[in-house]
Image (cartoon, helix red, strand yellow):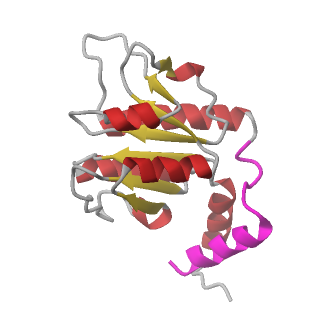
Amino acid sequence: MRKFKTEERLNKIIKVVKSRQPSLNVVIENVHDPHNVSAIFRTCDAVGVPKISLLYHIEDFPKISNVTSSSAVKWVEKERFNKTKECFAKLKKDGYKIYASMLSENAKNMYDIDFTEKVAIVLGNENRGVSEEAAELAHECFYIPMRGMIQSLNVSVAAAVTLYEAQRQRDAKGMYNQSELSEEKLNEVIDEWCDK
């Protein structure tokens, strides 16, 4: 039996769970500032990303605050990895096309990527960016076009810009109108959320 305070809250949970996009994943690689990590969790919740892969092989795993993430950490699952190969092998096995955010000659303009496919977006450390290993193991690298003197954005801002482009493409295709989850999985997640 589902526990919920009001009918309104139950309806919101059902609506949000139905719009989750399991075919859209985010990988955070060695992002050290917990405020940036929390901000990325908030954006993931906002656009319907159900799970973040935390890949930490240099930095320590971040402490994510319920306060700075506005409780998004409660609604977005996390999966931990300490090896890039292991993380990417799992994503590839699950059918994800992996795009790493990186400024390079071979990188693709973000607006030329089809984010309606099953994709994982990799965001790197604030200073070092995405690791060479991650860039090599990714299917492709992408960049966010910029017109200013400074050719970088804060990692949480880069995440928001990229994920909102993914949301725009998916919304235009009607992907938020029908759940990607089976009826059984949908009910399972709704029940879990009602207990949170």
Near-viewer residue (21 or 17): 21
Q: Residue furthest bottom?
A: 1
Is residue 180 a member of the stretch shown in magenta? yes
**Residue 43 visible in the picture:** no
Q: Residue at x 21, y 51 (%)?
A: 59
Q: Residue placed at 30% from the left, 63% from the top? A: 67
Say if residue 158 shows up in the picture. Answer: yes
Q: Residue at x 26, y 58 (%)?
A: 62
| Residue in view at x 61 percent, y 33 percent | 115
Q: Is residue 123 left or right of residue 193?
A: left
Give the image location of residue 127, x and y in percent: 20, 34
Q: Position of residue 72 (x, y in %)?
A: 43, 60
| Quadrant of the image occupied by residue 66 | bottom left
Magenta residues, as a range?
Answer: 175-196
Q: Tell me if residue 174 is in the magenta stretch.
A: no
71, above or below 99, in the image: below
- Quarter of the image that includes the N terminus: bottom right
Q: Quadrant of residue 29?
A: top left
Is 36 on the left-hand or right-hand side of 25? Answer: left
What is the x, y in percent for residue 30?
A: 28, 47
**Which of the 4 image quarters holds residue 114?**
top right
Rendering coords of residue 45 (x, y %): 50, 53
| Count of number-bearing discs | 0
